[in-house]
Amino acid sequence: MAIVNTNHKACTVNPLKMSQPIGAALAFMGLNNCMPTLHGSQGCTSFGLVLFVRHFREMIPMQTTAMNEVNTILGGMENIEQAIVNIWERTKPAVIGLASTGLTETKGDDVNAYIKLIRAKHPELADTAIVYASTPDYVGAFQDGWSKAAVCIIQETAEPCQVKQVNRVNVLPGSHLTPADIDEIREIIESFGLFAVFIPDISGSLDGHIPEDFTPTTLGGTTVLELRTMGAARATIAIGEQMHAAAIELEMKTGVPYTMFDRLTGLDANDNFVQFLSKLSGKPVALKYRRQRSQLQDAMLDAHFYTGGKKIAIGAEPDLLWSLGSFLSEMGCELAAVVTTTQSPLLEKMPAEEVLIGDLEDLEMRAKDCDLLITHSHGRQMAERLHIPFLRFGIPTFDRLGAAHKLTVGYRGTKELAFELANTFLAEDHEATPDSWRETFQEINTEVASEAQTTCASNGSCSSCN
Amino acid sequence: MASLNEKVQDVFNEPACDKNQAKGEKERKKGCTKQLTPGAAAGGCAFDGAKIALQPITDVAHLVHGPIACEGNGWDNRGAKSSDSKLYRTGFTTDISELDVIYGGEKRLYKSIREVLEKYNPPAVFVYQTCVTALIGDDIEAVCKAATTKFGKPIIPINAPGFVGAKNLGNKLAGEALLEYVIGTEEPELTTPYDINIIGEYNLAGELWQIKPLLDELGIRILACISGDAKYKEVAYSHRAKAAMMVCSKAMINVARKMEERYNIPFFEGSFYGITDTSESLRQISKLLVQQGAAEDLLSRTEKLIFREETRAWEGINRYRAKLQGKKVLLITGGVKSWSVVSALQEGGMEIVGTSVKKSTDEDKDKIKELMGEDAHMFDDMRPRDMYAMLKECRADIMLSGGRSQFVALKVKMPWLDINQERHHAYAGYVGMVELVKQIEQALYHPVWAQVRKPAPWETEVSEVSEAKAA
Ligand code: SF4
């Protein structure tokens, strides 16, 4: 149980947060043959593009409606039309994913109305899905943008299906899951004879594979056909609180019932998940996962010596924070400094005293005597100043390779995380020297001495004074 | 907004920019930023450009006034290095909320400036305007003025919101801000006849430090580098330099020209990429200084140093030349340095099969023609698809470009080298050129290529296996 506070500074210093539109853009990148497009000035797309290139080390398709001062004031209809037509002519995408920015939201462009007009004017666009998400930069954070895009994708494409695919489940993954995480979850689900369609699915598009040919749009991800048949699934699994709204939307539109999993990191969390799948499919848990569970138990036992009592400073978006933070606490760590980016019902449930919606300066101030720092790559300056070990989690991770392949879900991912944590502390282990304890004694001695003095001063009548 | 519009026009009227002068009155009004095509545009905004140009000033607090997008999505992402203060790598932003959008963000900005001064005590704060705050009419100039009076420290408005244009416009608007508010506001403790400014050099990957030892040896002092590894006060007293070198083509030509006009500081345009260019630049620096009153012997000392360094560099390069001779290079700088890199690569024996001239001036293009011959392959706007094809068909052996397009090369399993902003290696001066050639050689002959290009055995032996099965 935590108290959730918001910092009261005017100036954000060393941002932890990123903006909604690029969160939405990343969600669109999980759709196959899609062109994510920001409705705003070109710079917003450029910053987002560079960020994703540096994180995923992949070619990133991302466009802009290229608004300038004048057409912002006049309204963006013409730019959106041109952008859609140009993208359609150049790349023939199956989906165009539009997300607004602070600029166009300030003006108040009614993009949904524009799209209707544009569709009427351009019948050639009939086969191209156009999804629009309203994501002003000055509201919420990255995961909110992702979450809104997911809702809009469902609104735009999901429809009720008469025919059911009995083995199919829809999975709605949060933005905190990596391509590796998604692959792992898919494998677990498939072991029960089910097959999973992820919406969106960045494991197909951003997992770092080498394609045979060049495509200017996304390559891999959820196909439009898969989107249109979401209603045929037997169940929907949402992972991460940020997907709650999308899950409800999908159930309302198609009648497919959903189940929420707030995280898939940790022994308990995975037990619930695997048990759920077993019940859903009517199949027993595969030997492979029984064994993995036992390996995780063993790993936790081996690791607990080193993780117990450690103080952690962690800065992450709510769902990632919940996954990592809960497991850290299950491994006996104390979440001493916790900073996040945006509101979430999970925050007050965090096993910490306080969760602050703030920035990395706030985290740094609270992290002074912590044993470990966990946040995205922007924590690197802070870690240097604090002289504490630093594990990078979340987007952006630009100064380490393999961000897309980092695995923290399932029994296997949790086991790897347990080892990574324990190893980090092991590497910090300092050997004892003859003076290791001297200081402690000195401290105690001076404490005792000063205590004696204050006692004397306060009553002035003890024997040693006389 | 009127004053910003005027400034944008002023920048477009830059007389030293031949590209602009060649245009008609009307065309010039439109400026050097073409109207972008929605759905087919790439590149940073003016704010991005302004920040690139000024953030290398290391002891200043760079405060971005706008929603989280502008700073939050891209802070601490440049390779400009500092020999001292690290404050420039701290991300400051007002991170405005919906309420600020409705009621205006000026108060938040003012409070932010105070917080920054109280907590970090920088010699100055640079305040960057962005799209949303410009649109709602926040007057950052007025806020900065009030803050300067109140707090007694220079608070400098950088009025280059993203939507006024592209990066290069932002570079120039940043330069205008320096001219208006910073340059000429302080005095150096002492001056010498050997003081120069280097304008438009950002010390990426520490490249300035590949040049500085040479200048030190000649007794030439960099009074101010604008803006690589600079301190605020150095820029403020840079008007006392005797001569200036303008690097990086036209990015900050307005600064160089106006400083010549106002403070009689003659400048030349040069480059520290490539051996010949480095020598030429050193010569020009010495020549200008002697013209301005430095002792004559500087010229001969410079020649001596050039001779020694060139010999050394050639020896260095020759070690690789045999392996690089005739290798075909595709050069996509997306920027302004095309020609200086072209000559540098030719020195290594390589052949340039194509280069992008998207942001180059006519003069740049002429220089490229001069170097590569009349039938030089210059691409105005090369699409990734075309680069991909060119590499896949082996019409080039290696691509040199910025980080964004690296995967075009890597996905066809072709060598690639980063020569833009985020690169990790420094390529300036004589040592830098040897380093570049070494890196190219390493990239070309890396053992990884042979491995990743080999198809999986089952892909080539399919027939054998199935034959065996059949038998
Ligand atoms: S285009 Fe405008 S809103 Fe976007 S990053 Fe540039 S300044 Fe910020």
Image: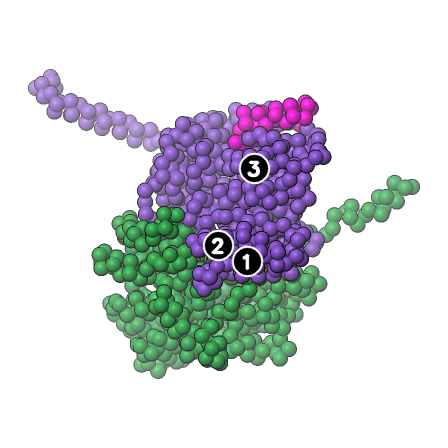
Chain colours: A purple, B green
Magenta-highlighted residues:
A262-288
Query: Mark 2 belongs to which subunit?
Result: A
Residue at 39% over, 30% down: A2
> Can you tell which mark lies on residue A433?
none
In this view, the residue in front, B1 or A183, is B1
Question: Of helix, strand and loop, which one carries label 3?
Answer: helix
Q: Visible in this render: residue B256?
A: yes
Query: Mark 1 belongs to which subunit?
Result: A
In this view, the residue in front, B282 or A271, is A271
Residues indicated by labels 3 and 2 sit on the same polypeptide chain: yes
Residue B279 position in % (x across, y down): 47, 75
Q: Identify whether A51 is placed above or below B388.
A: above
Q: Visible in this render: residue A415?
A: no
Residue A22 position in % (x across, y down): 51, 49
From the image, tell me which residue sits under label 1.
A80
**Residue A283 counted in the magenta span:** yes
From the image, tell me which residue sits under label 3.
A249
Q: Are marks 3 and 2 in contact (CB under 8 Å)?
A: no
Q: Quadrant of the C terminus of chain A?
A: top left
The quadrant holding residue B252 is bottom left
Residue at 68% over, 66% down: B395
Dot 3 alpha-carbon crowd within 10 angstroms: few under 14, some 14 to 19, many 20 or more: many
Residue at 60% over, 72% down: B378
Q: Identify whether A182 is placed above or below B66.
A: above
Query: Which residue type carries mark 1?
Result: Ile
Q: Are marks 1 and 2 in contact (CB under 8 Å)?
A: yes
Query: Which residue type carries mark 3?
Result: Glu
Q: Identify whether A29 is placed above or below B243.
A: above
Magenta portion: prevailing SS class: helix
Q: Identify whether A299 is placed above or below B87.
A: above
Residue B65 position in % (x across, y down): 37, 55
